[in-house]
Amino acid sequence: MGDTSQLALNPHLPKFETICRTYPLDIQSSCIRHLYATSLAAALVFVFTVYSFPITHPSWFGALFNPFKTFLTVDDAEKIITQAKESAVPDGAKPTPTPTSEPEPSPTYGALWRTIILFAFSLLESLTWLALGSYRAYTFSNTPSPDTLPIHITLPFITALTWLYACVKSLTRYPRPTPPYDLFTLFFVYFLAGSLDWAVLLYEKATVGWPWPPRIVLAAMAWHWITILLLLTVILGMPLGVESVRVRNYKKVGGFVMEEDYTTLWGWITFAWVVDLIDRGTEKDLEENDVPELSPSFQSKPMYERFMEFRQLTLVHQIIRANLLDLTLDFVLTFVSIILSYSSPFFLKHILVTIESTPKTPSFQFRSRAYIYAILMFLASFGKAEADVQHLWFGRRASTRVRSELMATIYVKALRRKHFSGVIGKEEEGKEKQKKIEDDGKGINKAGADTGRIVQLMAADANRIAKIFASAYFIYSAPMEIAIASAMLYRLLGWSAFAGFGVLVLASPLNHLLSKRGVTIGRGLSTARDKRMSVLNELVGGIKFIKFFAWEPQWIKRTLDARDYELKWLIKDRINSTL
C-alpha cells in the first residue's frame, strides 16, 4: 500500500530520512508505521528463534540469565510434594500407588481446536503478505514508479516470515494447552500497529477530509485487524496450567484450590480468579473448608528444597537470588506505573493548551486533538492500574516466599543447633553490662538462643523482613517520581519550582537523627520481645510445677514485668514514629 499521509515527496531530505522519504517520527506515514511494527516483530522473532535452539551458551551467559528464571513452577512443586509423600511411607509397609503429578499426555478437544485456529490463520496471514510482496515486486519490475520505494517491497516479505514463525510455532507446540507467550507478544505488537493504522485513518478523514482508501485496501485492513483480535482472544482463553491428578482428586472430594495457577491468561490479567472466593464470602460466612488449598509453589516443603539450591555466601544473597525474578518484575512494573501516572497530567496540560488556542469558531480539527489527548489519558490511567496490580502481586509473592524461606531456615537451624541452656557469654558477665544491654537494646546475646527467641524470630522478625520486600518499591520509586516531577515542574514554573527542596534540606538532619534513634529503639524492642516470649514459654512449659508449688504470684509478677518492659520500648517506638 502507498503512503496514506499523502505527503509530498522531498528528494532533498537527509540520508537517514530516505527510507520512507519522511521524518522518522512521522506516524502519519503508513511506511513509518509499517517499518517500526515489522522491525519490532522481526527482532522479537529473531530472539525467540535463537532462544528456542539448544545452543551451548558460555558460562557467563548462564550466570547472567539463570537467576531470572522462575523460582519454582507448579509442576516442580507437585513433583516434590509427591516424592515427599512416597518417602514418608514406613519401612515394610506397602506404599499406596501415587498417581503422577504430570498432566495427562492425551490432548484435549479445546487444545486441538486452538492449535488449528492459530495454525490456519497464521498461515493465511503469511501467504497474504507473501502475495502482496510478490505483487509489488512484479508491478515495480514492469512499471517502475517513484511512489514505490524498495522498503515497500521488502517489508511484506519480512512480515510474511514473522507470520510463518507463528504458523510453525503453533504447530510444533501441540498438544500443550498453555498460552504461547512469544506468539502473544508478537500478535499484541501487530494489534497495536493495526489499531494505530485505523486511528490515523479516521483522524485524517475527520480533520483533513482526505478520501477513503480503495475498498480492497479497507477490506484488507479490516481482515488483518480482526484476524489478530481473534488470535489474541484464543490465546487469552488458554489456561496457565493443567490440573494434576492430585489436584483433580482433591477437588472431587469437595476441596478448593487456588485458581491462580490454572486460570486463563485473561483471568490472570484481570485477576478474575479472585471473584469466586469473593462471591463465596458474600453468600455465607467462610469456614476452614471454604478456604482454598495453598498453591503448591507456595507450600513450605517444595519452597525450602528449591531455596536450598541457591546456596550463597550469605543468607541475604541467597534470598535475593531466589526471588530475583519477582524483584526485577516489581522494579520494571513500578517504573512503568510511575511513567503512566505522570502521563495523565501531561495529557491534561495539552488538553488545556488546545482549548486555550482554539479560535472562536473552532473546527473539528481542534476538538479532535482534545479528544485524542483525552483518550490517551484514559489509556494511560488504564495501563497504570494494570501495572500497579501486577507489580503489587509480584512484590507480595516475593514477600510471602521470603517469609516462608526464613521460617523454614530458622526451623531447620533450630533442630540442628546445640543445647546452650545456662551458657553465659563473656560480654554478658556482670550486672552492669547486663543492665546496659537491657537499657539501650544494643547488646547481642552470645549464648545460644532459647525457645522464646526462636519463636520471636519466626513470628515477628521473619514477618518484618518479608514486609521490607513487599514495600521495597517505595525505595526506588521515590527517586524516579522526584526526578520526573522536578523536570515537569521546572518546565512549568522554572527555578521557583525548587524552592520546596530547601525545606527538605533543612529537615534532613532531624530526619537522620530520628532514623538513628528508630534503629536503637527497634533493637531494644526486639530484645524486650525476646525476653517476654522466653518468660511465657517457660511459664507454659512448667505450668504443672508452678501450680503444685503455688508459685502463681511470683510468675504473674515476672510475666507482667516483662510485658511492662516491652510496653516502655513500644511507647518509645510509637512516639518516634509519630515524629
Image (cartoon, grey):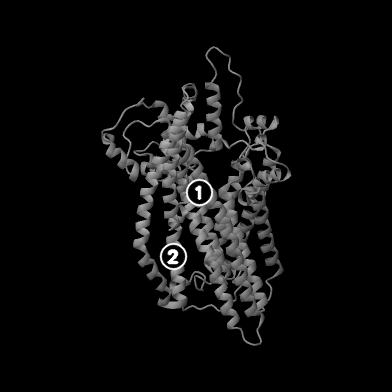
Answer whether residue 68 is visible to the viewer in this image.
no
Residue at image location 32% in from the left, 39% down from the top: 444
Residue at image location 45% in from the left, 66% down from the top: 484
Front position in the image: 407 or 490: 407
**Residue 482 numbered tag:** 2
Q: Identify the residue position indicated by label 1 in the image.
A: 395
Q: Amino acid at mark 1?
A: Gly
Query: In which quadrant will I find the N terminus?
Result: bottom right
Q: Label 1: how many residues lie within 10 Å, few (<14), some (14-19) or many (20+)?
A: many
Give the spatial CA distance, label 1 vs label 2.
Answer: 22 Å
Q: Amino acid at mark 2?
A: Ile
Front position in the image: 540 or 564: 564
Q: Label 2: how many residues lie within 10 Å, few (<14), some (14-19) or many (20+)?
A: few
Measuring from the top left, give residue 537's x and y in whole percent.
46, 30
The local secondary structure at tag 2 comes to helix
Measuring from the top left, give residue 573's x and y in whole percent.
42, 50
Picture layout, residue 6 above or below residue 99: below
